[in-house]
């Protein structure tokens, strides 16, 4: 019985832990009012009625939405790579991923700062050469501490550090699911979007173009027919989504009248949970594995129920004697449940060991979320709680049957 419960608990807790990692709410205090808008700005090539609009916006659309400020906060962004050059000693330059964004990124997503502050909307407008760096990069480049005001050379250009972010790593990284399905390393370098385009800094991400592209502007130009900009908006409440969706529809209608859009108006406005569900951050096989594991646990509990029933009924003479001596049925029922609870705790300990081994195997897989599949205090407590509840549930029927033993019939057999 201990083995049966332990195996079932181990399988269930392993898959449940992975499932909880993948379904974690990255912004629990505001995920219902932070939205990802999508506009159908492509040409008629490949058009299918009722299809989904592109995940990304053109730069022209993103800058117009940002300029009109219909949300409480809004931010446009994309990712790239840069080369950081160090002035200390013989340290070699190194390649660093960088996020180009606008000033509302930090308050909208709740990025904590250890030192300094993020840049302002005025810095966006002025294309200021300022950066916010993460705690890990700050330690690597400046040996930690308050590095506000220091200079950092990126791609041969000098930038002034105005803020140092505290460790911040929402899981999944909902605002950029292109990297390892949303479970990549935390961003460590942030720079104004406007500055990046003024300096024509590198791009790393998805790019989808249609029609002709101006050779001078390039694919990332303001007027290019290319979708590549990630855009997020925070509304005052989830109820404001209908008004913002109407605003997006009106924007699309105007662009159709201007000849930019060819397709019928087709907009989407997903909050963070809806966006993660649409992008299928939780793979279907993980959901299936979770259901199968709990189905296996149910089978193990049925097996345990049968074993407990046989165990308690074998003790019918003992139970009958206790009943004849005045023991109430409740005492017999409680004793059976206590025995089952002890079996459950032992099974939980065995299941905990199996779950630890299962999570270790998950961490060896080549998937982005593998490193997050760890045994935490919640998992530890949940394993024993599930084992105890499961064992008591399995023992309820056998204990009830044991209470029905007739004392007289058992005394005759002694």
Image (cartoon, rainbow, N blue to C red):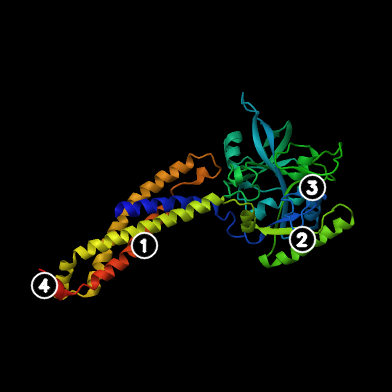
| Crowding at mark 2 (Cα within 10 Å: few <14, some 14-19, many 20+) | some
Of the residues under marks 4 and 1, which one precedes in the sequence? 1
Q: Are marks 3 and 2 in contact (CB under 8 Å)?
A: no
Q: Which mark is in front, 3 or 1? A: 1
**Alpha-carbon distance for marks 4 and 3?**
91 Å
Of residues 261 and 320, the one nearer the viewer is 320
Residue at the image point whose x is 50% and y is 40% from the top: 365
Label 2: which residue?
70
**Alpha-carbon distance for marks 1 and 2?**
50 Å
Residue at the image point whose x is 65% and y is 35% from the top: 96
Q: Is residue 45 above or below residue 141?
A: below
| Crowding at mark 3 (Cα within 10 Å: few <14, some 14-19, many 20+) | many
Of the residues under marks 4 and 3, which one precedes in the sequence? 3
What's the mark number on residue 59?
3
For mark 4, give the secondary structure. helix
Q: Is residue 118 visible?
A: yes
């Amino acid at each position: 019985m201990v083995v049966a419960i332990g195996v079932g608990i181990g399988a269930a807790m392993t898959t449940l832990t992975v499932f909880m990692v993948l379904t974690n709410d990255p912004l629990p205090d505001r995920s219902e009012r932070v939205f990802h808008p999508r506009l159908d700005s492509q040409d008629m090539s490949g058009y299918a009625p009722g299809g989904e609009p592109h995940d990304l916006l053109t730069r022209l659309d993103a800058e117009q939405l940002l300029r009109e400020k219909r949300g409480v906060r809004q931010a446009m962004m994309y990712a790239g790579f840069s080369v950081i050059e160090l002035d200390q000693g013989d340290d070699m330059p190194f390649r660093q991923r960088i996020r180009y964004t606008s000033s509302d990124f930090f308050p909208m997503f709740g990025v904590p700062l250890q030192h300094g502050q993020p840049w302002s909307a005025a810095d966006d407008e002025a294309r200021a050469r300022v950066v916010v760096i993460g705690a890990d990069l700050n330690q690597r480049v400046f040996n930690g501490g308050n590095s506000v005001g220091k200079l950092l050379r990126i791609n041969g250009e000098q930038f002034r550090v105005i803020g140092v972010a505290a460790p911040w790593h929402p899981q999944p990284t909902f605002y950029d699911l292109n990297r390892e399905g949303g479970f990549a390393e935390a961003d460590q370098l942030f720079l104004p979007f406007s500055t990046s385009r003024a300096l024509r800094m590198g791009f790393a991400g998805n790019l989808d173009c249609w029609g002709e592209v101006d050779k001078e502007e390039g694919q990332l130009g303001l007027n290019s027919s290319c979708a590549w900009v990630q855009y997020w908006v925070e509304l005052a409440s989830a109820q404001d989504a209908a008004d913002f969706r109407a605003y997006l529809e009106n924007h699309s209608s105007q662009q159709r009248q201007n000849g930019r859009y060819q397709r019928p108006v087709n907009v989407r406005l997903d909050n963070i949970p809806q966006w993660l569900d649409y992008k299928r951050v939780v793979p279907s096989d993980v959901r299936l594995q979770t259901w199968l594991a709990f189905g296996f646990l149910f089978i193990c509990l049925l097996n345990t129920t049968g074993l407990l029933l046989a165990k308690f009924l074998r003790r019918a003479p003992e139970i009958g004697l206790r009943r004849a001596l005045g023991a109430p049925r409740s005492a017999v029922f409680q004793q059976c449940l206590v025995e089952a609870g002890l079996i459950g705790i032992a099974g939980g300990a065995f299941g905990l060991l199996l779950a630890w081994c299962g999570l270790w195997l998950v961490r060896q897989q080549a998937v982005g979320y593998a490193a997050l599949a760890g045994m935490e205090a919640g998992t530890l407590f949940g394993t024993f709680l599930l084992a105890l509840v499961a064992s008591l549930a399995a023992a309820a029927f056998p204990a009830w049957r044991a209470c029905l033993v007739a004392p007289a019939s058992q005394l005759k057999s002694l």
